[in-house]
Amino acid sequence: MAHLAPLKIGDMPKPLPLRKLIGPSFIILGVGLGSGELILWPYLASNFGLGIAWAAVLGITFQFFINMEIQRYTLVTGESIFVGMTRKYGSWTPYWFIVTTLVPWMWPGITAAAAKLIASGLGIPYSGVIGAVLLLLMGGLFSLGKVVYKTQEQIQKAIILIGVPFVFIITLFFAKPTDWQALASGLIGRGEGYNFIPAALPFATFLAAFAYAGAGGNLNLAQSLYAKEKGYGMGKFSGRITNILAGKKEDVVLEGTTFKATKQNVAYFRVWWRRINIEHAIVFWITGAFTMLMLSLLAYSTVFGIKGVETSINFVIVEAGAIGAQTLPALGTFFLCMSAVMLFGTQFSVLGSNARIMSENLVTSSPARFPVSRIPKYFFSFLWLQIIAGVIIFAAGFTEPLTLVVIGAVLNAISMFIYSGLVIWLNSTELKSQMRPGLLRVLIVSFAFVFYGAFSIFTIIKNLPF
């Protein structure tokens, strides 16, 4: 693109130790905890059993490989995947990513779910007012943090390091040997009276859960931005977004810096690549799959077949009641509160990631009109745009959590179908041969592209009004 400067040439920095690379995957795991992990997959397990567990593992596996390709481009070039796709595919891509980020994610289903759980825990009537207050609180937290990336990372680390062990311990207490057997069977697609997909399962809900087996939608692309701000590889030469009120200003660079394929640079790249694969595999892939399976198993063990779990987020409330009845009432209340906190943390990071995506693409669309130096201001403008949109949706009477989550997830699955193909083609054609994805990774991401596409088209056709 004419308005984007060519990549500069430098040397690949010396790889950092693994312990210093941990961070970006906590954010992307956190944005998945409250959608797929806590809502959709346990909801499906409480209604249809554990025979669909295979799809949760397959979904997060797809996202692992897609995310790594997203990070590959930034590791090599030091610029975001959005800039790379604008270079490759043209000036329409920034506008596409702004629209496909704002529209699917403006539906505040995760916030609505958190608000409903808080209302239940406090014993007060649920209303959209609670959800609106939560959205405003999230905006306030972002406005207080000095560095946006650090604010998200610290909050998500705290939630995950407390929430995941708690879920595991409580699942060990409730799950019976037959429940573990049902989970093992579900991992190979064997359910109770069905194989792979139960006949009564709504395809829109299944596609939504599959898309949210991990982060989902354009949120996966934000991994490129956080890899850059964490200083992965050539991302060391980019700046971070700071708070326009409290943060110390850093120079944010739009165009990146790559390197010549010398022996040392390629060797450094391979060490970086191996270590960030390990970081993402441990934090996102393994921890994410484990959490989804444990929460689904817990839902199955406590509320499967019980009346009242057929609709909405009620299954979590019923689940908390069952936990309290079989142990201590306080433990059931704590589970409800922990679930609400996880949902809050998810929506918090969703807002931040989306604002980061949209501000990056706004600048990419026309650096002359939208200078990169103003990207922190664009970030907070998009952040509050999402919050205001969510408040308006609540005020308009859209307060049903599951409906809002499914609407957003189906739209996000369609977006994932499109960009997974764009990303793998970009890396396979624009990067130097030593840094390109291997055949296995190309095949896996291509299969994900076909899978998302087929299910998206089938879901659209199945829900047509004629």
Image: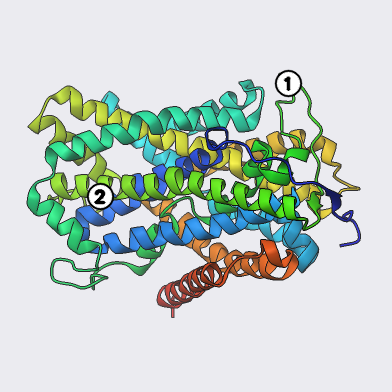
Q: Quadrant of the C terminus?
A: bottom left
Nearest the viewer among 143 and 27 is 27
**Mark pair 1, 2: CA separation:** 42 Å
Nearest the viewer among 83 and 306 is 83
Q: Quadrant of the N terminus?
A: bottom right
Looking at the rendered structure, the kind of residue marked 1 is Leu
Q: Which residue is mark 2?
A: 296
Nearest the viewer among 345 and 21 is 21
Residue 320 lies, in percent from the top left, at: 20, 35
User: What number is the disc on residue 245?
Assistant: 1
Residue 398 seen by the camera: no
Looking at the rendered structure, the kind of residue marked 2 is Ser
Q: Quadrant of residue 433?
A: bottom right
Residue 411 vertical position relative to residue 220 in the rendered view, above or below = below
Cβ–Cβ below 8 Å for labels 1 and 2?
Answer: no
**Which residue appears at 50% of the width and 43% of the height?**
279
Nearest the viewer among 35 and 435 is 435
Residue 297 seen by the camera: yes
Residue 390 falls left or right of residue 464: right
Q: Earlier in the sequence, mark 1 or mark 2?
A: 1
